[in-house]
Amino acid sequence: MKAFPGVLLSIAVSTLLSGVGLAQVSITTYHNDNSRTGQNLSETILTPANVNVNKFGRLFTQTVDGYVYAQPLYLPNVSIAGGTHNVVYVATEHDSVYAFDGDSNTGSNATPLWQVSFINPSAGITTVSSNDVGCSDLVPEIGITSTPVIDSNSKTIYVVAKTKENGKFFQRLHALDVTTGAEKFGGPIVLKAGVPGSGDGSVNGVVHYNALRQHQRAALLLQNGTLYISSAAHCDIGPYHGWILAYNASTLAATGAYNSTANGGLGGFWASGGGPAADASSNVYVVTGNGTFDASTGHDFGDSVLKLAPPASNRLKVLDFFTPYNQDALSQADADVGSGGLTLLPDQTGAHPHLLVQSGKEGTIYLIDRDKMGHFNPNNNNQIVQSLDEIIGGMWSSPTWWNNNVYFGGSFDFLRVFSFNPSTELLSTTSVGSSPTFFNFPGPVPSISASGTSNAIVWAIQTEGYANGTSEILHAYNATNLSSELYNSAQNAGRDDAGGAVKFAAPTIANGKVYVGAVQKLDVYGLLP
């Protein structure tokens, strides 16, 4: 099996064994690895043969204090709370982080192993309300929106929390001990940065990070000792920019900052909860949304896929980029590329050994050579490896890779799969499979569980119910035949209801369990007793 850059940093198979003698997998970052493939290749318990409404369902629920937008994270065999537990970590919009036993909520496991809160209303420290930002995209409060990241080696979980403190607004980076929730490395620290520029909100030639206007939605990235935090806005309310802030994971010292539109505006890093990706050389890949683009100077990069070098001299440098030929039209129509996340494909052996795939609101799939990304061609996108124009529903999610297949959860579309041919290094020009389920806005974030190249299941949460207060639906499909739905949580809603829907929810599959965040709860699914 070919190497997946960043996978070994983020999906680690522990040398410890569980009580049933199976190696345990860790899920420590969004979409399972730093390539953002969305796959767990070490799932030996859940298979297409046993995931059905008779054998599989909701096992238990844990109540939390807010909406769960962040993907739950998972560590096995943690020495915590006087015992050893497989632990699931959950962050909420009420500015709390929980550590729960991932296998049970009975007895002593009915309560969190630990919980920390970053608010103190009696001291004037609260979450931020939707009225504060003038946007109803997140209601009723804004606290922790992005998916945290865990460093298994240092036993640290990194979280960004937004707070309102006696009328002022802050975003802070917290580094918490995974066993106690205690702050580490002298944290927390306040997010702040400034870069030279004449763009929106600049003062005396400097653009500063705005804690109120910047929305830290995209998942955190930890790569080679550097923590990356990216942001966009609330409802496109300015002044805002696309910011990436870099910090030393061991000291929390700021090591770099990047602004995608320092001489203009917008250009946020959205990705609908997806995170920056990183390759084996620690280059970072991100996608911007609508905003200023200036091909002649290379300073402003609205609607672009960017490759950034690791931080140096307190800055992050753009090494390469791709911008669609119709960038201006996309920006004018609010059809930005950056609504969708990106996925790094495993290394190939042909002319394009390093590829990435991405799609945004227009539903065009871009297959890009990471070593020669193509820059900007005002006439067409022929300079990149492949462009499949408006072939899927608009993407408010991230692609998923498994066994030479790429899965897309488009909006107002079916879940679709395109095959990848290693010989030609091209995707199929039409989808080679689709789900029986039609997904409205915002479409699902697909995830894969498999035992290597066998027993693969595509998991997807249907979240359109967020708009009318109805429940999410967890779906499971045969990854080799998407038309075969194995299970969904509405088949036996009385037993399996997934709870109030939350946009862009991504499931976590680990060691025979599926963890699903919702409105004020975490649902845990698995094989029924």
Image (spheres, grey):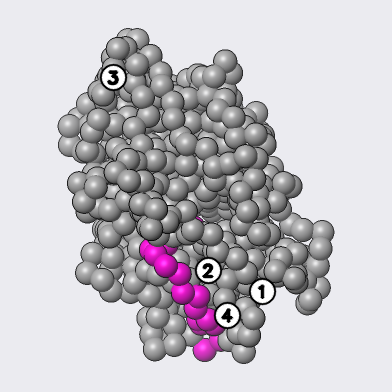
Relative to 523, does residue 93 appear above or below in the rendering?
above
| Residue depicted at 53% across the width and 30% down the height | 246
The residue tagged 3 is: 202
Residue 328 at what x, y percent from top left?
Answer: 22, 26
Answer with left or right where residue 302 lies relative to residue 450: left
Disc 2 versus disc 4: nearer the observer: 4
Label located before the other in sequence (1 or 2): 1
Q: Are marks 3 and 2 in contact (CB under 8 Å)?
A: no
The residue tagged 2 is: 515
**Badge 1: few (under 14), some or many (20 or more) residues near its Cα, within 10 Å?**
some
What separation in Å lies between label 2 and label 4 (alpha carbons)?
A: 16 Å
Q: Which residues are magenta?
A: 54-71
Q: Amino acid at mark 1?
A: Ile
Answer with left or right where residue 413 lies relative to residue 64: left
Disc 1 versus disc 2: nearer the observer: 2
What separation in Å lies between label 3 and label 1 (alpha carbons)?
A: 54 Å
Q: Considering the image in quadrants, where does the C terminus appear?
A: bottom right
Residue 88 at what x, y percent from top left?
Answer: 59, 65
What separation in Å lies between label 3 and label 2 (alpha carbons)?
A: 43 Å
Quarter assignment of residue 499 = bottom left
Disc 3 versus disc 2: nearer the observer: 3
Residue 481 inside the magenta-drawn segment:
no
Q: Amino acid at mark 2?
A: Tyr
The residue tagged 4 is: 110
The residue tagged 1 is: 45
| Residue depicted at 62% across the width and 61% down the height | 74
Residue 394 at what x, y percent from top left?
Answer: 29, 48
Q: Are marks 4 and 3 in contact (CB under 8 Å)?
A: no
Quarter assignment of residue 467 = bottom left
